[in-house]
Image (spheres, rainbow, N blue to C red):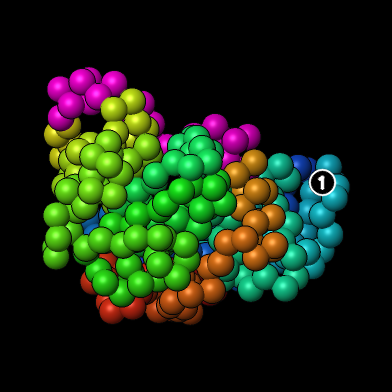
Amino acid sequence: MRIAVLKGVKNFVIEEASIPSLEVDEVLMRVKACGICTSELYLWNGKIKDAAFPLYLGHEPSGVVEDAGRKVNGLNIGDHVTFLSETGCFAEYAKAKKGNIVKIADNIPFEEALGEPVACAVNGIRRSNIQFGDNVVVIGCGFMGLLLIQLASLRGPSRILAVDINDERLKLAADLGADLTVNPREIDAIKYVKSVTNRRGADVVIEATGEQAPLSMATEMVRIRGRLVIFGYHVGEPRLINMQMWNWKGLDVINAHEREPEVYMEGMQIGMMLLSKGKIKLKNLITHKYPLEEINNAFNDVNMKIGGLIKAVVAP
Ligand SMILES: [Zn+2]
């Protein structure tokens, strides 16, 4: 089979490899689509230093069951699935433990059935504990932010306010459930949040950028005893936080990155259920699709944030 191997910074090479062999409790999938994640971008572009090349990336797959070990039941050859993989999924085939696989309806396009990032977003919202009537701010309207907005709106908030510096993305945010949108390059977003919450600040602020400035902004926007949810993936230099303000406001600060495998899979089940019921929509978020051979171009486009790109997938 063909597999993309990251040999160094900005250097994927397509290699020939043998199809993964199965343990008794493992399942082999033909990979149909695999999302490109920001965490992988930082390995490709060198923002994460000292990466141990070669790397086998691709952890947001969907595909078709091709074969299964003898202790696997409840899955059939030909089933459409999404999964947490044991192997890199920028490849024609990948394998997973039987417990790390979620079946998807046949009518869901593979490029939308990205169980892993959807699970992250579902679990982030579960951790955020949004209550009926809450004022919610989501900072960052990339793929994750736009998913978080849709999931947050299922929790019955009184208002969702989306923040981004890109007006195109803000328009998408409004289409997907944000009641208000604000571009901090145009107006003072902190003042705006205060003005629409009777000067209290928001009940829940979700930071979905992984950058310093929005993290600082989030601290200012959240109300006394509110919840500051850090969903963004923060790499590189340690962040500066206003501990005095965290302390004085008595904030609940939630690092919403899920690490517990069982919770991860629950999130994936819930996410795929919501997708099949049409409660969340990914159609307009999956904007770019590349064959395996084009993987360096795909990462380059994600790195350059080319116009209109929300989420790119590789289709091996
Ligand atoms: Zn990811």
Across and down, in percent, residue 67 comes to 77, 59
Residue at the image point whose x is 75% and y is 70% from the top: 106
Q: Is residue 78 above or below residue 212?
A: below
SS category of the residue bearing label 1: loop
In the rendered image, is residue 316 in sight? Answer: yes
Image quadrant in which you'd find residue 113: bottom right
Question: Mark 1 Cα within 10 Å, few/some/many (few <14, many 20+)?
Answer: some
The verdict on residue 141 being magenta is no
Label 1 is placed on what type of residue?
A: Val
The verdict on residue 247 being magenta is yes
Please state the extent of the stretch shown in magenta in the rendering: 242-265
Viewer-nearest residue: 29 or 132: 132
Residue at the image point whose x is 55% and y is 46% from the top: 155
Across and down, in percent, residue 22 comes to 71, 50
Side of 158 where 163 appears, left or right = left
Could you tell me how many numbered marks the image carries? 1
Residue under label 1: 72
Image quadrant in which you'd find residue 256: top left
